[in-house]
Amino acid sequence: MTVQSYIYKNLWLQVVISLIVGLGVGLILGDDVGVGLDNDTLDSLSSYLKIPANIFLSVILMIIVPLIFASIVVAIANLGAKEKIKTLGFGIGIYFVITTTIAILVAITLATIIAPGSILDLTALQETHELSEDDLKVTDGFSFDDIPNAVSNIIPRNPIASYLEGQMFSILVMALIVGLSMTVLPKESVQPLLDLLESIQKITLHILLISMKIVPFAVFGLIVGMVAKVGIETMGGLGVYMGTVIAGLGVMLLVYSMILKFVAKRSISATFSKFRNPQTLAFSTASSMATMPVTLKTAEEDLKIDNRVSKFVIPLGTTVNMDGTALYQVIAVFFLAQLFAIELSIISILVIIITSLLASIGTPAVPGAGVIVLSTILITVGIPPVGILLLISVDRILDMIRTMVNVTGDLTASCVFDRITRKVES
């Protein structure tokens, strides 16, 4: 096999090459070591370079709702037996809550010990972005009186509106209700709808697989723009914050390793080597949803996981299992609280834990969604959301890493429940 054909057959390698080349071009165009293009020229060039990424993201947003809905309903309906639904449904829910809670506790521990926000100067943020005192004003935080209304809105009152607005958690709840209802009805009465949803699932997955061909070009354009605009020195100023997040994500990978070893009873090295393709794609696209077709293929073909398990756990995990995102959000909240000199009480920390857990469940599996959800958490504890401006410059890198951790968590969960269901059947 020639080098050219090897590169052509391995998407992860194409992405790595695109990252390296994009980094080099970004440095050349930026102020640090290159020609230093003016802002208008750089903005114009970046808008063209981002075309592949924008097209790819548009494809994802176009099919995300029918894909998630169809995948969950079909997976539940195909499980059939109530014992399997009970094993997977309740079991995977508890499993996801446990791993996300572990991620949040890891984040709190690291953020408290390292205290990355105490290193930076708040005046630098104020001068760089020309912020007023009102922008930096600390407000009252979350009230427990708001909890009943939040819980009441979990069930979508208008499913059509939820679909049109892309409210993923509401769509997930609706899919679970429909899927569970189909399991108790006679098979012949639900078969037409099941056939239709299976066709929708196959079509949307095929569209995603075709769109993967432009991923290397999308990665190149995004990296060039980011490096040229932000610069190496500015990114280095947030190194401690980034290091704290990366250290926490590394701990979560160790947690998954232990789960694979002692719960799923699989070899850590052999299993992680098979995770490589979806991990690399998740790192490059920063989207669990974009990676899902490759994640499913890896689970079924490389890991030999029962497709009834993989097609339930992975679409569900892509929507609600965001351990890396939850960890990042908690560290970001602590970082900004330390930056604004806000003393977090025990009650505030409990609110952060609960809010981060719920927010991670509702975070869309598309690039940059973590920052959008982070603003909600900041408001709950009274931290000025304007602090996000400081995090945006390095968010893309962290988004790529935490998405890779999210996908690793989905594959690990698939391995665990594949073993559990096989034991139940035997």
Image (cartoon, rainbow, N blue to C red):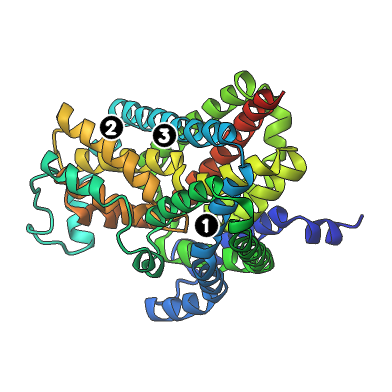
Residue of label 3: 100
Residue 233 visible from this viewpoint:
no
Of residues 42 and 337, the one nearer the viewer is 337
Indicate the position of residue 112 as horizontal and vertical percent values. Answer: 28, 28
Sequence-wise, the earlier of marks 1 and 2 is 1
Indicate the position of residue 95 as horizontal and vertical percent values. Answer: 48, 30
Sequence-wise, the earlier of marks 2 and 3 is 3
Indicate the position of residue 195 as horizontal and vertical percent values. Answer: 65, 62
Dot 1 crowding, Cα within 10 Å, few <14, some 14–19, many 20+: many
Residue of label 2: 115
* CA–CA distance in space, label 2 to label 3: 22 Å
Q: Kindly state the secondary structure of the residue where label 2 is placed.
A: loop
Q: Kindly state the secondary structure of the residue where label 3 is placed.
A: helix
Of residues 234 and 3, the one nearer the viewer is 3
User: In the image, which disc is placed on residue 68?
Assistant: 1
Q: Kindly state the secondary structure of the residue where label 1 is placed.
A: helix
Which of discs 2 and 3 lies nearer the camera? The answer is: 3
Q: Is residue 250 left or right of residue 337?
A: right
Of residues 326 and 29, the one nearer the viewer is 326
Of residues 256 and 293, the one nearer the viewer is 293
* CA–CA distance in space, label 1 to label 3: 21 Å
> The N terminus lies in which quarter of the figure?
bottom right
Say if 19 sits above or below 82 in the image.
below
| Quarter of the rendering containing residue 254 | top right
| Quarter of the rendering containing residue 36 | bottom left
